[in-house]
Amino acid sequence: MPRPARSLEEIEAEKEKIMKKAVEVINAEGFENFNMRKLGKHLGIAAKTIYNYYKNKDELYLTILAYGFKELFDQCQKALNNLSNPFDKLEAMGRVYIDFGLTQSNYYNLMFTWNVPKYNDFANTPFENLARIELNTSLAIFKLFIDVIREARAGLSEEDAQFFVIYFWSLVHGYLAGYNNTLLNYMHNDPISIKERIIETIIRHIKSEFNNIH
């Protein structure tokens, strides 16, 4: 008797299971050393089974990135609910960003830390469209921060808005990178305890810099 066809929900659940395990394997062994055979071994299935869900390593990798950026965007957008003060919005998104980087460090490393393939690496390949989806999803987060920065300082030029978002990101990313690679443990006896102060200090400095712009 033929096996009944899987439902769409079952297929999506299996794809998510494969994707999440792939993130673990990539972070443990590095992107360059990652392949479907190793992933299959960790999942306890044959590599050919994975190809029923993903065409190859590139498609799986891009799906992982798109998923991570979509999760972060949704969380940042949700943090804006019921907030009217733009600085409160920026602070709330900063907390979300840090919490994502701390609790989803495997995704964060791929999205922001490691030297892994980006959109341009997939230009003129069969995966260009999927890479564009991933790129647009990541840039949506950047635009969300841009919009809040410009809301906080009326008349701010696009160039200045970009600068402040990059400044904000650079400081937060530095903290996350230092925490996730344990370097901060050599500088502070409880680095997680200073995350609120990090955010508050960045916001306070941005406010001060806004006052110097004419």
Image (tube, rainbow, N blue to C red):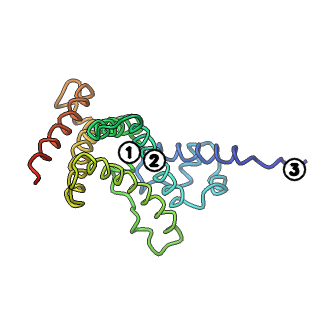
The numbered disc on residue 68 is 2
Residue extending farthest to the right is: 1
Q: Amino acid at mark 3?
A: Pro
Whole-Å distance between the Cαs marked 3 and 1?
Answer: 42 Å
Q: Amino acid at mark 1?
A: Tyr
- Asked if residue 90 lies left or right of residue 128, the reply is left
Whole-Å distance between the Cαs marked 2 and 3?
Answer: 37 Å
Q: For mark 1, give the secondary structure.
A: helix
- Asked if residue 11 lies left or right of residue 214, the reply is right
The numbered disc on residue 108 is 1
The residue labelled by disc 3 is 2
Q: Position of residue 210 (x, y in %)?
A: 14, 47
Q: Nearer the viewer, mark 3 or mark 1?
A: 1
Q: Position of residue 17 (x, y in %)?
A: 59, 42
Rate crowding at label 3 as few (under 14), some (14 to 19) or many (20 or more) other CA atoms within 10 Å.
Answer: few
Whole-Å distance between the Cαs marked 1 and 2?
Answer: 8 Å
Q: For mark 2, give the secondary structure.
A: helix
- Looking at the image, tell me whether mark 2 or mark 3 is earlier in sequence order: 3
